[in-house]
Amino acid sequence: MNPAPLVAVVGNPNAGKSALFNALTGARQKVGNYPGVTVERKGGRMTLPDGRPVELVDLPGSYGLDPSSPDEAVTRDVLLGKQKGERLPDALLIVVDASNLDNHLRFALQLIALGLPTVVALNMIDMARRDGLEIDAERLSADLGVPVVETVAVRRRGIEQLRGSLAELLLGPRKIRAGAAPSHDPLQLQRSARSIAAHAVRSETPVRRITHRLDAVLLHPVAGPLILAGILFVMFQAVFAWSETPVGWIETLVAWAGDRASATLPPGILRSLVVDGAINGVGAVITFLPQILILFLFILLLEATGYMVRAAFLMDRLMHRVGLSGRSFIPLLSSFACAVPGIMATRTIDNEKDRLTTILVAPLMTCSARLPVYTLVIAAFIPARKVGGVIGLQGLVLFGLYLAGIVGALLAAAVLRRSVAKGASGFFMMELPKYQLPILKDVALGLWQRAAIFLKRAGGIILVTTLVLWALTSFPQAGPGQKQSEVSIAGHIADGIETVVRPVGFNHEISLALLPAMAAREVAVSAIATVYSVDSKDEDQQAANLEDRLRGRWPLPTALAFLAWFVFAPQCISTIAVTRRETNGWKWPLFMVGYLFALAYIAAGATYWLARFAGL
């Protein structure tokens, strides 16, 4: 006796697939696991209008036939007849969300290309109409070449029509074409899906039309990346152009606080602790708060408008070329704020090798803690002039540093995926939200939270580290003609570090700042400020801002090497700790620190000697 025909219910996550499966099978369901994997298998029986039984299997939701998780791998294997203990389906029931048609048709097109008898359930059609979207099911059916039935699974609408369509397919001759999955270029697949969806839409709201028109430009394979690069370029120009006035206010406030403390406290250790350690050290970091907030203002606006997900879509193809899944984009994007949440966000990546690679390269994305170091050195050594009369040179250099971090992360990922993290990677499909105007209240709240985090960090780990550094640089006291930062405990420690970093152009002050910077990147700034404050006995020199002090003491090749170092430098203790927790051991954190230190050393050395040979 021939077994009952097998129909696979398949579609994107959140398409209403399980609700439709339940409506077709009722209580006649069995739940278990697929052989060899811990992925749930949900099967059931449906009766056709003529009384014949049909077996249904509800496959895990998937975005495509290139799996990025065990669930998606099972879906692919069942559809291609490669799943152990599972026969090849006789027909497919593809479930798509009518209100998100262009995105869901990407997978539907791949499935239809398999050659199996197919019916498309245009599900949640009521939600689409509620949003002002009218779809011509007959036109969609003609374009896809398969029957299309409108359904509302939760209300059992269209269920009988669906049974009838399946009966017609199963009565006719089978057109099964087994074999490898069809090969589709993701971008070409997306364009085809959008073209078919647009042709099937009778009418839609102005918001949807505007979204499609904007996406036609912003997601264009040529115009899209250029627009993204332009947005990032403007963002880094604004970090300098817009922050000049508020930075001046904070510098004035810090100077006033130092003067008040100096006038109130008698000369001695206590005044040095308060002025040189706390006020000058921490104040040097707080000065950069406006630049950090400007950076996050752009990030929050891009997220609120719906553009950030489009940026992820644009980056997905590039990331695939270096062996990373598109799922890695969001964790790497989060690392621009801080590598710690970025590394924690890798938990959403199912592929073990993809996740490990993302963790190892996340520190190369330029976190906000590096911004004070960048802006300090750029303000001190890069002239505030225009290139071509329009583009600010300082913003251009900052853009280049961020770009160097991104390129470095991609190149490191490519090497890691071909060596210590070798393995296959999946493809990631993303849902594109509607464009919308940002809610200013939410943006303001986001900036407030970022400012609070920064100030809490400045009043916590940065303050403690700065005070410890002050103590190490203040004792023992220097004698006549001696330099305090050289005879102190910290000075002797720096002597040992300088032996290692002198070949790449680093001086004694930089050597002293590298070690405490492991606690937090910003501490490099406060460390340099503390050293110069402790060394300075001249009140006029103490009143000078840190940029002026650096400009007079560092050669330009050293400054450029310092910037190159911080593009690749090993991360702070918090990042190392979270890497150990996420990888369950010390092997990968130590590997990460080692390869980042090597990259930083090579980059700094190459920059220093090239700058010297160029006569800078």
Image (spheres, rainbow, N blue to C red):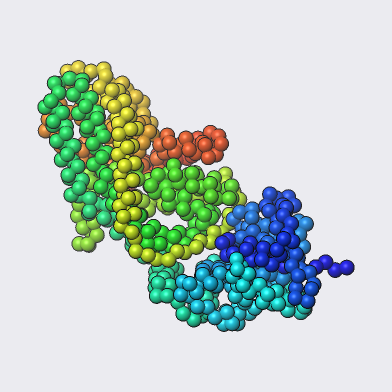
Residue at point 20% right, 47% down? 246
Tell me: residue 603, above or below residue 31. above
Tell me: residue 36, above or below residue 138. above
Left or right side of 275 for 403? right
Q: Position of residue 189 (x, y in %)?
A: 55, 70
Q: Position of residue 315 (x, y in %)?
A: 46, 59
Left or right side of 30 for 327? left
Residue 187 seen anywhere in this rendered image of the structure: yes
Left or right side of 487 for 571? right
460 and 16: which is toward the camera: 16
Residue 357 seen anywhere in this rendered image of the structure: no
Residue at point 13% right, 30% down? 260
Q: Position of residue 208 (x, y in %)?
A: 43, 72
How many numbered callouts?
Answer: 0
Residue at point 88% right, 68% down? 1
Specify the quadrant of the image occupied by residue 523: top left
48 and 399: which is toward the camera: 48
Q: Position of residue 454 (x, y in %)?
A: 32, 41
Residue at point 51% right, 61% down? 430
